[in-house]
């Protein structure tokens, strides 16, 4: 408090001195002298000092106008929108395959049939192509379902690649949905190759359902995988003897 009062008296003294000097230099000019212009104090200089003499006067700062900057609007995608949903994994398609024991292999053969002969064991679901070195090529096959089994000996009378299919009348009677004719191709039940047996309706043929190999599923024909019947097709010719046991 004491220092504030002392400071106020110093300000008064300084203001008085300025006023006295102003009156001294603004007096009448003597001979040969030009009177100086009157000294005027700017209110901007005296106002801060006068405000200090007023007790309790608060300094008011000029209001600062803040410039409002408009923020750009950011469009946020909805989490539940289709674009933001996690990708749904499609269920994997299970492909049925042939049982491993029915894949082609070479086995020893000590039977009575001569090389070049085809022997089909319908109980074990195997087809053997007898070779000249005491071995046989063995393939897995599908055979006739119950009521359609048969046994006998025939020769291959015809060979066909991607054969057409004409279901017999008896088969169409059992299954009216079958067509009267189906052109050869991947969708054809006879598959990639067919070996026709004698004058019968039976064949050794391929299949577009490889998972049926090793089972009794056909109407009497001998089924093979497409790749297996294609291999057999190249190894045998018309006139080859076939034994079905």
Image (cartoon, rainbow, N blue to C red):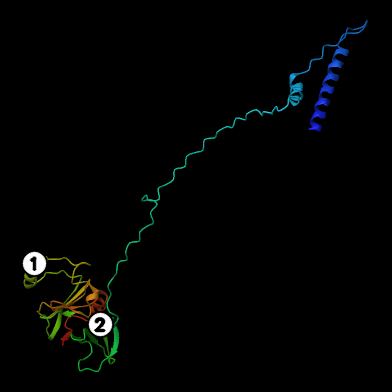
Query: Disc 1 on helix, strand or loop?
Result: loop
Determine which quarter of the picture holds residue 231: bottom left
Front-most of 51 and 94? 51
Picture layout, residue 84 above or below residue 212: above
Judged by depth in the image, the label closer to the viewer, 1 or 2, is: 1
Q: Quadrant of the C terminus?
A: bottom left
Would you identify the image quadrant in which residue 232 lies? bottom left
Residue 70 in the image, given as x and y percentages of width and height = 52, 35
The structure residue drawn at horizontal position 40% and vertical position 48%, both measured from the top left corner, is 78
The reply to whether the C-beta atoms of the residues labelled 1 and 2 are less than 8 Å apart is no
Residue 213 in percent (x, y) is at 23, 78
As drawn, is 13 to the left or to the right of 237? right
Q: Position of residue 27 (x, y in %)?
A: 87, 9
Specify the label residue 38 is tagged with.
Answer: none
On screen, residue 136 versus residue 189, left or right, reads right
Locate the N terminus and report the quarter of the image it occupies.
Answer: top right
Q: Is residue 206 above or below residue 59?
A: below
Q: Quadrant of residue 98?
A: bottom left
Which residue does the numbered mark 2 point to in the structure image?
139
Q: Tag 2, which secondary structure?
A: strand
**Which residue appears at 78% of the width and 17% of the height?**
41
**In the shown orientation, is residue 103 left or right of residue 168?**
right
Q: How many numbered marks, from 0 up?
A: 2
Please identify the residue farthest to the top as the structure is shown. 31
Real-space CA distance between mark 1 and mark 2, rounded to the nearest whole angstrom: 33 Å
Which sits in the foreground, 5 or 116? 5
Query: Which callout, 1 or 2, points at the residue further toward the start of the chain?
Result: 2
Number of other residues with Cα within 10 Å of mark 2, as a class: few under 14, some 14 to 19, many 20 or more:
many
Image coordinates of residue 115 in percent, x first then y, are: 23, 89
* Residue assigned mark 1: 176
């Amino acid at each position: 408090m004491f220092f504030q009062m002392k400071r106020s008296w110093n300000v008064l003294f300084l203001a008085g001195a300025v006023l006295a000097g102003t009156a001294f230099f603004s007096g009448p000019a003597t001979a040969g002298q030009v009177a100086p212009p009157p000294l005027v104090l700017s209110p901007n200089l005296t106002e801060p000092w006068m405000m200090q003499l007023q007790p309790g006067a608060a300094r008011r700062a000029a209001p600062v106008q803040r410039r409002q900057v408009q923020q750009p609007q950011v469009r946020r995608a909805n989490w539940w929108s289709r674009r933001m949903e996690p990708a749904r994994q499609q269920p994997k398609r299970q492909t049925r395959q042939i049982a491993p024991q029915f894949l082609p292999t070479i086995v020893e053969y000590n039977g009575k049939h001569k090389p070049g002969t085809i022997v089909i064991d319908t109980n074990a679901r195997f087809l053997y192509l007898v070779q000249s070195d005491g071995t046989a090529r063995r393939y897995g096959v599908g055979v006739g379902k119950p009521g359609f089994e048969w046994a006998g000996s025939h020769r291959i009378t015809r060979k066909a690649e991607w054969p057409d299919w004409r279901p017999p009348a008896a088969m169409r009677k059992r299954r009216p949905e079958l067509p009267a004719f189906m052109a050869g191709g991947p969708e054809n039940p006879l598959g990639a190759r067919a070996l026709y047996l004698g004058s019968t309706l039976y064949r050794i043929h391929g299949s577009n359902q490889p998972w049926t190999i090793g089972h009794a599923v056909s109407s009497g024909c001998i089924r093979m995988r497409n790749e297996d019947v294609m291999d057999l097709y190249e190894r045998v010719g018309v006139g080859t003897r076939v034994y079905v046991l």
